[in-house]
Amino acid sequence: MFPRTLILAAALGAAALAATTANASEPKQGGTLVIRMNADIRATDGVNRDSNTDTVLHHIFETLVGYRDDLTIGPVLAESWEISEDGRTYTFKIREGATFHDGDPVTAADVKWNWDRRMAMAEEWRCADYFNGAQGLEVTSVEAPDDETVVYTLKDPNALFLTQLANIQCNNWVASPKNADADGNWIPDSAIGSGPFTLKEWRKGEYVALGRYDNYVPLEEPSSGYAGARIPYVDEARFLIIPDTAAAEAALYGGEIDVLPGFEAQRIAEAEGRGIEVLHTDGLSWTPILIQTNDDLMSDVRMRKAVAHAIDLDQIAKTRSDGLASGNPSAVAQASAFFDEDFLKWPEYDPAKTRALLEEVGYNNEPLKIQTNTKYQGMYDNSVLLQAMLAAAGINAELEVLDWPAQLDNYLAGKFQLQSFGYSARLDPSLMYGVLIGDKEKDPWRQWSNDEAYDLYLRSTTTSDFEERKALLKQIHALMAEDVPILGIYYEPVIDAVTSNVEGYAAWPGDKTRAWGVWLTE
């Protein structure tokens, strides 16, 4: 295995990122690829989700389009598409030979069924607002004129339509209608998709085993990111649940697992000394501290700025990443072509300003609770570092350690003062702002209710002009630096460790483990 450099074109421009790939022999079929997962998936319906759930389900199901390594949009279930001259009509052709795991051909009617079903459950599917006009983009109709053709019509042209269709966290994939009962309700644990792997066994709390779908017909375009040919080589991809980080590392060294995603940067040297290949690239997964601006204490912007002045972003970033990452308070990653130094403008690290603001707001040593968990080591470590910095600046911070499902439920309900969190990679800055900005009364998981910022966000989705979009993103960030509704810290570098018998595995900025295109030498 040997490192390979990829040139990554982010959004509408280009940014150079170093990536590595395990790939030195001819592909062969067979064997079981064991991948560590730190917590169980939540469901198979694509609505009750988290990052682990997304990772597993995108092996079973396919979106029409997906992100390539260079963050452009490529084919997945749709082998091609055309856009009308007015930018309002998108016509997709389904991949020839695509079938569901029960043998049924995938038809345009199935695509429409999935679309209609999701939009009918808009209260549960958090991505509905990305397509119903609430955030600018409105799909007015989806039609299936024949078995191979799907036509989407938009109310107005929108630069993010394909980007949103490919949005990994939306799980806007196509499932067999047989996953639902006669009333349209998803059958628990059902997972009939068209992807390269089938759901073989889900032993809850232990592992999720996926089997190779032998009748999968891949695209001719080479595999890249989540797009192109998804060729399955291994007989089984087993996502083994190992919550404890140290136990996962021991399992890697002991040969019990083959792939350990999210490897700790501080452990790279030891791993390489043990014959483990460590693959890494710049990432797009944002690590923030969430702030509940509706909280009595944190509703005062002066208190939020006091907290911001107490945090040395670079120190936390470099400590956590062993120097691979630097601080970034913005929803625009260093890996993005839109990024420049303006996105680093933020209330500077200055504990003296913190103390002055605390006196101004009449802070009386009230406890400020930081919710965190130990399933995600980075979230826990960040909360410990944050607590120490706040204490040094005169803020009484306490850790509230929860299990991950409970913390995630609190995030969704907005039940916290501060919360150590992580957003999985959004491959366009507007997608990240689309998650952050909105009505907290309607969606408690939104972090920022600001009408001016929301208007700027909508404008950023309607233009494809690079410089115009960049200027709008800068205006959003400047407002965020004044309002401080969230404390961005850094972007996690993607670091995956693999054993010497694994070939074809690659780390990529999308930060999602992919078992297709991977084979075992022994």
Image: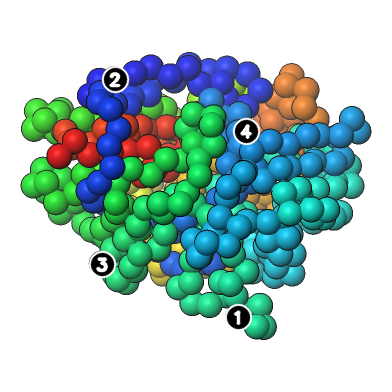
Q: Secondary structure at mark 4?
A: strand
> Does residue 295 appear to the left or right of 1 in the view shown?
right
Q: CA distance from mark 2 to mark 3?
A: 33 Å
For discs 1 and 4, the disc positioned in front in the rendered view: 1
Numbered tag placed on residue 206 in the rendering: 3
Query: Which residue, given by chain and number where applicable, does mark 2 sit on?
Result: 3
Q: Position of residue 491 (x, y in %)?
A: 44, 35
- Is residue 352 toward the left or the right of residue 236 in the image? right
Viewer-side label of 1, 3 = 1
Residue 333's place in the image compared with 480, above or below, is above
**Residue 482 percent across, percent down from the top left:** 65, 38
Residue 467 sits in quarter: top right
Residue under label 4? 73
- Which residue appears at 33% of the width and 24% of the height? 20
Please tell me how crowded label 4 is: few (under 14), some (14-19), or many (20+) other residues with Cα within 10 Å: some
Q: What label sits on residue 265 in the rendered view? A: none
Can residue 125 be spotted in the picture? yes
Q: Which is more N-terminal, label 3 or label 4?
A: 4
Q: Quadrant of the C terminus?
A: top left
In the displayed image of the protein, which residue is found farthest to the bottom?
183
Q: Position of residue 438 (x, y in %)?
A: 71, 54
Q: CA distance from mark 4 to mark 3?
A: 35 Å
> Callout 1: 10 Å neighbours few (<14), some, many (20+)?
few
Q: Earlier in the sequence, mark 4 or mark 2?
A: 2
Residue found at x 42% / y 32%: 508
**Disc on the earlier residue, 1 or 3:** 1
Residue under label 1? 181
How far is the residue under mark 1 from the one under mark 4? 33 Å
Q: Earlier in the sequence, mark 1 or mark 2?
A: 2
Quarter of the view holding residue 476: top right
Residue type of the residue flagged with mark 1: Asp
Q: Quadrant of the N terminus?
A: top left
